[in-house]
Image (cartoon, helix red, strand yellow):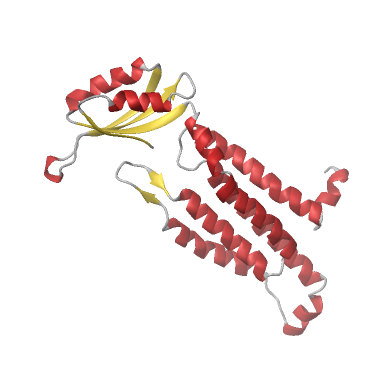
Amino acid sequence: MIESLDYLRQMNIAALILRLTLAMMFGGMIGLERGRKGRPAGFRTYMLVCLGAALTMLLSQYEYHMLTTRWAGLAAEIGIRTDVSRFGAQVINGIGFLGAGTIIVTGRQEVKGLTTAAGLWASACMGLAIGAGFYECVAIAFVLIFLSVHVLSPLEVLIIENARNMNIYVEFRSLDNVGEIINRIKAQDVQIYEAEVDHGQESLSRHPNAIFSLRMNQKGGHARLLASISEMDDVYVIHDI
């Protein structure tokens, strides 16, 4: 390993800032690619999950360091003979079930709640660090999580709006309209690489609908494409998902 980086492998403020910032940046960069392709888990979701995972690892290192130095006498006195990081692991597993409950799939096959679940999980990781008294790491993590949840939200919207890939949900009068919709999409210089058509159910008053996965040859044409399709008389609902 590179010896010049040994200082940043220790438990110090510079190492904490670097590790958490790298987790936020690299997680966000991976999520950026997913966001451009219109996938449910995008920029901020990946960022929060990577940040929470890094925080959990730092907490485990902090607990081990404290138990072998400042807390060594207390640990010997009360007879701690287990890995304290296991306590946090159980909390994180439990929060996973709670986070899964915030994720829903709508009738339009749109996944919602992933960023909320990721933020909930990252907050649980931060709570563990608070309980352990790892105040330096908590302060850094709070700032980065706050930036991910609140400040970077407009940036994620901007990325999605300018992405080349998009998915749209369309409800229409009958299956005879599918060909006309496809022609309208292609007229906007957009490629269709996947289409999922639902025949609908008259008994449930559900119109035929379709989900189109599209690739735009030019950036910034989302609104124009949606407006073009919505002008069709036989289209009832159109929504970007």
Q: Describe residue 223's horizontal placement relative to residue 91 as left or right.
A: left
When asked about the image quadrant of residue 70, the answer is bottom right
Whether residue 24 appears in this view of the structure is yes
Q: Is residue 11 above or below residue 75?
A: above
Determine the residue positioned at 29% across, 45% down: 107
Which picture quadrant has residue 176?
Answer: top left
Residue occupying image coordinates x 49% and y 54%:
117
Report the number of numbered marks: 0
Inspect this view and state whether residue 198 appears.
Answer: no
Q: What x and y, as percent, mark residue 232?
A: 24, 24
Give the residue displayed 27% in from the left and 23% down from the top: 181
* Residue 1 screen position, x and y as percent: 82, 43
The quadrant of the image that shows the C terminus is top left
130 left or right, relative to 109: right
- Above or below, 32 against 229 in this view is below
Q: Position of residue 18 (x, y in %)?
A: 75, 48
Q: Residue at x 40, y 28 (%)?
A: 223
Q: Is residue 129 above or below residue 32?
A: below
